């Protein structure tokens, strides 16, 4: 099978007319994206980004990652939103589920995250963990003045310089920022930090395939060359309008469902490793489409866990929802249910079956129940969880998001509403100028 396959038959039933009617809109959206003629066209650098990533850049990122790996037990990725979610999504999907319960191994640092909140206890407890430890920092910010990461970086920089010395700390800090301007660019130049550039034409939520995501992923020990290769493959597959272009089909189907009254999309997975992929997806679609009083509300659930909490609402609540299920075809390991002579738990009917077979039947049973309950269901099948398939999945969702946003009639590449809370917060904190 291909890296990704999309099945829409369990959704098409609910909105076939709308799906057929929006073909021209989808084709126009793809042309607008490829030709760069639509709103927000100064932020379309991600469209052809995978194919433009050079071997030299990958080699340089891997060299930086190796330096941090050899000198750190922990590397803290400081950023918020698109500056950390993509990396965390990939790192979590490829990691041992219990990775953070193990002590760091030599040349295998743990990647931690900071600056994604303003939690005082979170910050203090991170400081406690890093006190007396060898650690490095990857600080990611276009401006260097975004409140959450700026506070975290100021505190962690102070701790690192205190522990390692100011001179040694320079080699343990990497800044990913604007090419020429901004507070972080100025600081990095003054202090002599190694830097990488956030391209001007790539917005934060589309930046996972830039150094923003690639460096933390490489530090975690994953193969970014394979990740990029998967994205390149999907870039080619979704280049032109076609009934086989799964990004186009997904964008058409979700817009058809929206037009038929389905206002909430639930991204579901049956693998706990994909939890943070759902978090990345929520930002990508929420920030891209939620404007002009329009947009599908993006939510995410982890099944079967959330079937025991959200399952009742999904099954019988207000019928304004649809589901997109990410299904992993083949796990990386095999574990079977053992037999038990006493059979007190009544599970011997499962003896000898793979745990994944049970999971797949739970997935199928859930799909049947939800569709019968009036919830349209799309299924996105990933061959397996590895760098190549995740690269393809990332680009698939990015491309579909651009198409879907243009079909909706909004600018998918700005986020004016994000500034509202900041202005109020700055005024309340008496920041100069507010």
Image: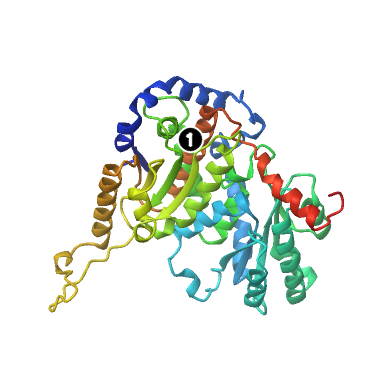
Q: Residue at x 48, y 74 (%)?
A: 101
In this view of the protein, which residue sits in the foreground, 404 or 429? 429
Residue 193 visible in the displayed image: yes
Say above or below: 71 vs 6.
below
Where residue 177 sits: x, y (%)?
71, 49
Where residue 10 sits: x, y (%)?
30, 38
Where residue 422 sits: x, y (%)?
73, 50
Q: Residue at x 64, y 35 (%)?
A: 43
Q: Is residue 420 left or right of residue 233?
A: right
Q: Name the residue that disc number 1 marks.
A: 400
Q: Residues within 10 Å of mark 1 (few under 14, many from 20)?
A: many
Q: Secondary structure at mark 1?
A: helix
Q: Quadrant of the N terminus?
A: top left
Q: Residue furthest right?
A: 432
Give the image's coloring scheme. Answer: rainbow
Residue 144 visible in the displayed image: no
Where residue 335 sits: x, y (%)?
27, 66
Q: Residue at x 45, y 37 (%)?
A: 234
């Amino acid at each position: 099978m291909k890296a990704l396959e999309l099945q829409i038959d369990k959704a098409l039933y609910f909105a076939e007319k709308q799906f057929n009617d929006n073909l021209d809109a989808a084709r126009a959206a793809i042309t607008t994206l490829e030709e760069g003629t639509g709103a927000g066209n100064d932020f379309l650098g991600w469209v052809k980004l995978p194919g433009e990533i050079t071997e030299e850049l990958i080699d340089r990122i891997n060299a930086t990652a190796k330096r941090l790996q050899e000198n750190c037990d922990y590397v803290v990725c400081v950023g918020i939103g698109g500056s950390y979610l993509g990396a965390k999504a990939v790192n979590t999907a490829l990691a041992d589920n219990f990775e953070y319960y193990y002590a760091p191994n030599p040349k295998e640092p743990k990647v931690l995250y900071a600056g994604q909140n303003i939690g005082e206890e979170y910050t203090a407890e991170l400081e406690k963990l890093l006190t007396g430890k060898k650690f490095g920092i990857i600080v990611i910010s276009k401006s260097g003045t975004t409140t959450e990461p700026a506070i975290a970086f100021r505190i962690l920089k102070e701790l690192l310089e205190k522990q390692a010395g100011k001179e040694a700390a320079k080699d343990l800090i990497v800044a990913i920022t604007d090419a020429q301007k901004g507070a972080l660019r100025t600081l990095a130049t003054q202090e002599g930090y190694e830097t990488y550039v956030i391209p001007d034409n790539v917005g934060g939520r589309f930046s996972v395939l830039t150094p923003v995501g690639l460096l933390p992923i490489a530090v975690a020990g994953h193969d970014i060359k394979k990740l990029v290769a998967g994205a390149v493959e999907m870039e080619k597959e979704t280049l032109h309008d076609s009934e086989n272009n799964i990004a186009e089909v997904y964008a058409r189907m979700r817009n058809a469902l929206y037009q038929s009254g389905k206002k909430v999309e639930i991204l579901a997975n049956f693998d706990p490793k994909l939890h943070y992929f759902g978090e990345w997806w929520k930002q990508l679609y929420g920030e891209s489409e939620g404007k002009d009083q329009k947009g599908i509300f993006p939510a995410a659930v982890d099944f079967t866990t959330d079937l025991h909490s959200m399952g009742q609402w999904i099954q019988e609540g207000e019928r304004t929802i649809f589901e997109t299920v990410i299904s992993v075809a083949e796990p990386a390991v095999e574990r079977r249910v053992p037999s038990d002579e006493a059979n007190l738990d009544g599970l011997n009917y499962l003896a000898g079956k793979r745990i994944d077979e049970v999971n797949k039947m739970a997935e199928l049973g859930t799909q049947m129940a939800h569709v019968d309950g009036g919830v349209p269901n799309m299924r996105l099948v990933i061959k397996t969880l590895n760098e190549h398939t995740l690269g393809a999945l990332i680009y698939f969702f990015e491309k579909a998001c651009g198409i879907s946003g243009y079909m909706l009639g909004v600018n998918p590449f700005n986020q004016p509403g994000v500034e509202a809370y900041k202005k109020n917060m700055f005024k309340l904190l008496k920041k100069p100028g507010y």
